[in-house]
Each structure stands twice: as structure tokens, then as C-alpha cells.
Image: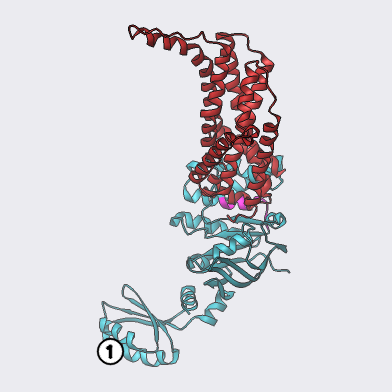
Chain colours: A cyan, B red
């Protein structure tokens, strides 16, 4: 099966600023794909190129086999796009907006009305279908944004930071919606919220400074890139242990959350040998010690900082 | 099909975003004001004269020509400014808010988006002008009488073309920049340039503002020389505005 998205040497410069630097990427069809990166990594620029809103300075991008370009409407017929902050005509109601989008896609009459009602149902906006969009909450706008992106039954759905501006309930709704799209269409979702990616994405690409740093499924990424992580839980503060650990050359990073220390090792063998000896000195203050399963955050931080 | 959807949206927007209401209200108000002002001004001047002893002001009786002159004055001074204010955000405002990016992510051509927008604005302007013209015609007939319907239509066609030029310049400004305020300032600059050009020797007689002089002559039943060059220049300027807007907009990154 041909890839749903292909980027070859995709480069975008704004004067002296390089937003994208020779990005190579392939996304298999029907995957829910997480496009991860810190702010300013080039995620939105990639999204806009794939959506046909801007042209690359160099390189090419194909979406569902079509060249993505502002001058190629055929590619935009196969793509549904949700920008980071979707904007609508506040004077329209939700159903009117979907029918307007249907018109842009060449759908008319009953076909358009049926599809609009289906999507309003899918995104849980049937009750608000006749309300002016100007009065919608952020979460409702985001869900309407997903509905309009799905109007043309796109082969590829591009979601730019779909949950980053939402409250926990809005985030939960949007992620559930994305999960429900699994197997129906290719979802290419950019975000910097790692928990969202862990929850819904099968495959992940990490970008930093406009370049692809890694691409694999989540488990592979952990195996390949995660440094060994140890968790130590203590009863109360242990400043002496913390000071000692910070001086150890085999310790790469220490994160403290309450009474739990999360320690990323630079040298796993030495960590396994020396950490228990250091912890033995804590005596009854030690509550728990274990080698933890690395998270996507551990992988992300290691790759992006590198 | 996409063009129809865009056009329908633009026309609906003129109504729902109250642009038609603002334009229609302004044209109606100044349409009524023209003949009334012409009728009452001499009376007001006379009244002012009686309050100062020893001064006798003799104002000529108001005529149909005064009513037409007042109507054209409003069409040339205040209403272009209202057209500018009502339409300066047509493209720039949508860029600013991000609604245009959502539309352009669909399989529609950028040219179609611009044509639909300009057409929507033009329809709103012509509807508003029609309303104002009907009001002006009615009141002029009531207060003065003797207004030739054909001449009045010809006068409004000439003045309407001038307003379309102002609209097109505003539309061009709106397509060139990314903020409504900047679009307004640029459009005002274009309008001032147009007025300056009209005062230049030789060149001036072929510029769109000359259409207003022509309109006044037609309305008053005076022998009009036929400012055909100004008419063709106006039509060409409208086309140029649309083409330049498209050339810029097709390459613009949103």
C-alpha cells in the first residue's frame, strides 16, 4: 500500500530563518500518527505545506499520492485540515458552516445535509447545530473544526495541535473522537502534549529545529532511544542523597515529583551497581526503588536535547 | 460549484454581518438628505438674516439643479468614505481572523475566492445605492418635481461606477495587507491619489472622479459632453484592481 504522506527533503525558509530543514517522512495509510516536537520545531509549517496553504522552499510533499501545493486543488480534495486555532464565521451556525464547506467540496442537496448531520452527531454538536458559532466554547469550536475537516471523507486528516488549548474535559472529548477515527482515515496529528500521543498514536515522528530526529512506533522508540530510568521513593526529603546523585557522572538527569525521584542514567551498568549502595544508607527512609519503564517523555527529552 | 458556495456565503454575509444594513442605511439617509437640504438651505439662510438687524440676505429660490448637486455632493464626499469603512476588512479581516485559511484548505481557487468577495460587495453597494436613489428620486419629485427618470438613472449609473472604483481600490488594499486597519489606511491613500490625479491638467479629465461631474450634468438635464474616456478608465481600473489583488493573493502564504 502506498504511503498516505510522503515528505522528501522538505525545506522551508523565511529569510534567514530555517523553519524546516530537509524533512524526510513517510506515514502509512490509516495510521494515527503523532508528529511531535517542541514549539518552533516546524510542525505547523509542515502541516500548512501538507494542507496546500504554503509552498516549500525546496523538496516535495505528497498527500494520498497527490503533490501538496497551493496550486493543486486535487491534493486539498483528499485532505481535511484543522488548524491550531480554527476560525469560523461567527454569524453562521454550525450546520450552515458544514453545508458551506460541503458546497466548497462540490457536495449538494441531500448528500450534503445528511453528511453534515452525521458529523454533527459524531462530534456531539447536534444539539447546538442551529446556534451561532460566535457563541461556541473553545472545545465546541475544536469539535466543529474536526467535523468540517471530515466533511469530504478525506484520505488524510491533518490535525495541528488539536488539544493543546483545551481544558481537560475538552481534551478528553477531542482525543476520544480521534480514537474513533482509527482505521477509517489517516490521522496526522501534531502536538507537544506527550500524554495525548501516548494515548492515541500508534506511530510517532519527533522533529526538532526543523529536522526529523526519529520515527518509529512508540515501543520501538522506547527501546531504541530511552535511557534507563530508575525511580526512588523516600519518606521525606533527602537533600544529601540528591546532592550526591547530582555529582555522579553516570546520572544524566534527575526529576523530582514530591517524594519520588526519577533518575535517568547515562551508564545503566554503573547505575545498577552503585545506586543500591547509595540507597542503602537511607535505611528506613527508603520506601521504594525500581527500574522504571521509560516514557515517551524520556525519549522526547533525550532526543530533543541531543 | 465551489464558486456558487462562495458567492452565496458572501451575499449572506452582507446581510448577516449587517454590512448591507450599514450601507443601505447610509445611502438612504443621504439620499433623503440631498433634496431636503437643497429645499431648506435658502430658508435657513433667510432666517439667519432676519436675526441680524440691517442685513438683508437674498437667496435664490431652490431648484431641481440644487437638489441634484447636493445628492452628487453626498455621493462624492461622504458615501465613498462609508463604502471604504464598510469594506476595508473584506479580505484583510479574514486573513487576520484565520477564516480564509480554513476556506483555502478546501479545493477552491484563490481567484474564485476574490471574485466572489468582490461580487458580494458590489451587489451590496448597488443594492444600497438603489435604495438611496429611490429615496432621493421620490423626495426630489415631491419637493421640486420635473426630474426626468431616464436622466436620473443615467446619473446614478455614472455615480455608481465611481463608487465601484472606490470599492475596488478598497478591495485591492484589503487583499494586499494583513490587517483591517492597514487596509483602511491604504485604501484611503488610494482614494486621495485618485482625487489628486483628477485635479491634474489633461490627465485629470480622464479619471474616475470626472464621472461625478458627468452624473451631475446628466441629472440636471444639462448638455453633457460624454466622459467616455473616464468611463473606460474606471472600468479598466476596476479590472486592474482585481488582477493585482489576485496576483498578490495567489502567492500569499496564510
* Residue A151 lies in the magenta stretch: yes
For this rendering, which residue is in front, B96 or B145?
A: B145
The x, y position of residue B150, in whole percent, is 69, 17
- Magenta stretch: helix, strand or loop mostly: helix
Q: Chain of mark 1?
A: A
Residue A193 versus residue A252 in the image, above or below = above
Residue B66 versus residue B127 in the image, above or below = above
For this rendering, which residue is in front, A59 or A43?
A: A59
Residue numbers of the magenta segment? A145-154
Mark 1 surroundings within 10 Å by alpha-carbon count, few (fewer than 14), some (14 through 19), many (20 or more): few
Residue A142 seen in the figure:
yes
Per the image, the residue denoted by label 1 is A281
Is B172 left, or right, of B42 in this rendering? Answer: right
Q: Residue at x 52, y 26 (%)?
A: B26
Is A285 left, or right, of B213 in this rendering? Answer: left
Circle 1: element type: loop
Residue B21 seen in the figure:
no
The x, y position of residue A36, in whole percent, is 53, 68
Q: Quadrant of residue B68?
A: top right
The x, y position of residue B187, in whole percent, is 54, 41
Quadrant housing the N terminus of chain A: bottom right
Quick one: which residue is furthest to the front in this view?
A: B201
Q: Quadrant of residue B210?
A: top right
* Residue B213 lies in the magenta stretch: no
Amino acid at each position: 500500500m502506498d504511503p498516505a504522506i510522503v515528505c522528501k527533503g522538505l525545506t522551508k525558509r523565511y529569510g534567514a530563518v530555517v523553519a524546516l530543514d530537509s524533512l524526510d517522512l513517510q506515514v502509512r495509510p490509516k495510521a494515527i500518527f503523532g508528529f511531535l516536537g517542541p514549539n518552533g520545531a516546524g510542525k505547523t509549517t509542515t502541516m500548512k505545506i501538507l494542507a496546500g496553504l504554503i509552498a516549500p522552499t525546496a523538496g516535495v510533499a505528497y498527500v494520498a499520492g497527490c503533490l501538496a501545493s497551493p496550486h493543486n486543488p486535487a491534493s486539498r480534495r483528499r485532505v481535511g485540515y484543522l488548524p491550531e486555532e480554527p476560525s469560523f464565521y461567527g454569524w453562521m451556525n454550525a450546520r450552515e458552516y458544514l453545508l458551506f464547506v460541503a458546497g466548497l467540496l462540490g457536495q449538494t442537496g441531500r448528500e450534503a445535509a445528511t453528511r453534515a448531520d452525521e458529523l454533527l452527531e459524531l462530534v456531539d454538536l447536534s444539539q447546538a447545530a442551529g446556534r451561532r458559532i460566535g457563541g461556541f466554547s473553545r472545545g465546541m469550536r475544536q469539535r466543529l473544526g474536526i467535523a468540517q475537516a471530515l466533511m469530504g471523507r478525506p484520505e488524510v486528516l491533518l490535525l495541528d495541535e488539536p488539544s493543546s488549548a483545551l481544558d481537560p474535559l475538552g481534551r478528553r472529548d477531542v482525543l476520544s473522537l480521534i480514537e474513533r477515527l482509527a482505521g477509517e482515515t489517516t490521522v496526522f496529528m501534531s502536538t507537544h502534549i506527550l500524554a495525548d500521543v501516548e494515548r492515541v498514536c500508534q506511530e510517532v515522528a519527533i522533529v526538532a529545529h526543523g529536522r526529523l530526529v526519529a520515527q518509529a512506533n512508540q515501543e520501538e522508540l522506547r527501546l531504541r532511544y530511552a535511557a534507563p530510568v530508575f525511580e526512588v521513593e523516600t519518606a521525606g526529603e533527602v537533600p544529601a542523597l540528591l546532592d550526591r546523585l547530582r555529582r555522579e557522572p553516570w546520572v544524566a538527569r534527575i526529576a523530582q515529583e514530591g517524594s519520588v525521584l526519577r533518575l535517568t542514567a547515562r551508564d545503566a551498568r554503573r547505575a545498577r551497581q552503585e545506586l543500591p549502595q547509595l540507597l542503602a544508607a537511607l535505611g528506613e527512609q527508603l520506601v521504594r526503588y525500581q527500574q522504571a519503564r521509560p516514557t515517551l517523555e524520556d525519549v522526547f527529552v533525550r532526543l530533543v536535547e541531543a | 460549484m465551489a464558486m456558487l458556495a462562495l458567492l452565496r456565503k458572501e451575499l449572506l454575509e452582507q446581510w448577516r454581518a449587517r454590512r448591507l444594513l450599514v450601507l443601505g442605511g447610509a445611502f438612504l439617509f443621504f439620499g433623503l438628505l440631498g433634496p431636503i437640504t437643497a429645499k431648506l438651505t435658502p430658508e435657513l439662510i433667510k432666517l439667519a438674516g432676519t436675526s441680524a438687524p440691517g442685513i438683508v440676505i437674498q437667496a435664490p429660490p431652490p431648484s431641481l439643479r440644487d437638489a441634484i448637486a447636493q445628492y452628487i455632493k453626498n455621493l462624492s464626499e461622504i458615501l465613498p468614505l462609508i463604502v471604504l469603512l464598510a469594506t476595508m476588512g473584506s479580505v484583510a479581516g479574514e486573513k487576520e481572523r484565520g477564516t480564509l485559511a480554513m476556506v483555502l484548505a478546501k479545493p477552491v481557487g484563490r481567484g474564485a475566492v476574490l471574485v466572489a468577495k468582490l461580487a458580494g460587495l458590489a451587489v451590496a453597494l448597488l443594492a444600497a445605492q438603489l435604495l438611496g436613489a429611490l429615496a432621493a428620486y421620490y423626495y426630489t419629485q415631491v419637493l421640486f418635481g420635473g426630474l426626468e427618470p431616464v436622466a436620473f438613472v443615467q446619473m446614478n449609473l455614472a455615480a455608481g461606477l465611481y463608487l465601484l472604483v472606490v470599492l475596488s481600490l478598497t478591495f485591492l488594499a484589503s487583499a494586499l495587507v494583513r490587517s483591517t486597519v492597514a487596509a483602511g489606511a491604504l485604501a484611503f491613500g488610494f482614494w486621495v491619489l485618485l482625487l489628486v490625479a483628477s485635479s491634474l491638467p489633461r490627465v485629470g479629465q480622464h479619471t474616475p472622479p470626472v464621472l461625478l461631474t458627468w452624473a451631475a450634468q446628466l441629472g440636471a438635464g444639462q448638455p453633457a459632453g460624454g466622459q467616455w474616456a473616464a468611463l473606460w478608465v474606471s472600468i479598466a481600473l476596476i479590472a486592474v484592481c482585481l488582477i493585482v489583488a489576485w496576483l498578490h493573493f495567489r502567492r500569499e502564504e496564510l
